[in-house]
Image (cartoon, rainbow, N blue to C red):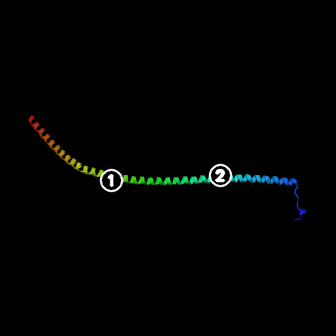
Amino acid sequence: MKEAERMSLTEADKAWIKTELSDIRTEVAGLRTEVDGLRTEIAGVRIEVDGLRTEVAGLRTEVDGLKVEVEGLKTGLDGVKAEVERVETALLTEFHKWASPVEMRQRSHSAAIRALDIEVEALSDRVTKLENRQQQ
């Protein structure tokens, strides 16, 4: 293009372009400020996420510790259960040792008492007969 064919701008056009460029620069500066704010927010969110990850890791550690405790309690309860079963067996064994002779003695005492009852009844019959004879 030749110099003569170039379009020339009027002062009003130049002023309008300057105003538009100024507005665009202002908008870009505002956008940069917003982007910086978003970057700051994102950094804050990342810090929060890191904090949450740390907290979750701590909770996992705590849960693992609780699992170990529960397993320990289960093991302890298994030991208590075994001890209760041992004591139960020992008590039943001792009761049977005691009850068997007692039952035998009770049976022999019952037999002796029945025999005594029979003798007492026989003696009572004899006394009754003797009393009847004396009254006649």
Query: Which quadrant, please, contains the N terminus?
Result: bottom right
Who's the residue at 54% across and 53% down the image?
56
Q: Which residue is mark 1?
A: 86
Rendering coords of residue 100 (x, y %): 24, 51
| Depth order, front residue of 39/57 | 39
Who's the residue at 10% across and 38% down the image?
130
Q: Amino acid at mark 1?
A: Arg
Rendering coords of residue 126 (x, y %): 12, 40
| Depth order, front residue of 125/58 | 58
Can the viewer see residue 49? yes
Image mark count = 2
What crowding class fits label 2: few (fewer than 14 Cα within 10 Å), some (14-19), or many (20 or more)? few
- Of tags 1 and 2, which is closer to the observer? 2
Rendering coords of residue 60 (x, y %): 51, 54
Q: Which residue is mark 2?
A: 41
In the drawing, does residue 59 fall left or right of residue 117? right
Q: Quadrant of residue 136?
A: top left
Q: Amino acid at mark 2?
A: Glu
| Separation of residues labelled 1 and 2 (CA atoms) | 66 Å
In the drawing, does residue 120 fall left or right of residue 1? left
Can the viewer see residue 136? no
| Depth order, front residue of 54/14 | 14
In the drawing, does residue 55 fall left or right of residue 117? right
Q: Tag on residue 1?
A: none
Under circle 1, the secondary element is helix
Who's the residue at 82% across and 53% down the image?
18
In the drawing, does residue 72 fall left or right of residue 110? right
Who's the residue at 67% across and 53% down the image?
38
Of all residues shown, which one is farthest toward the front?
3
Under circle 2, the secondary element is helix
Rendering coords of residue 118 (x, y %): 16, 44
The earlier-in-sequence mark between 1 and 2 is 2
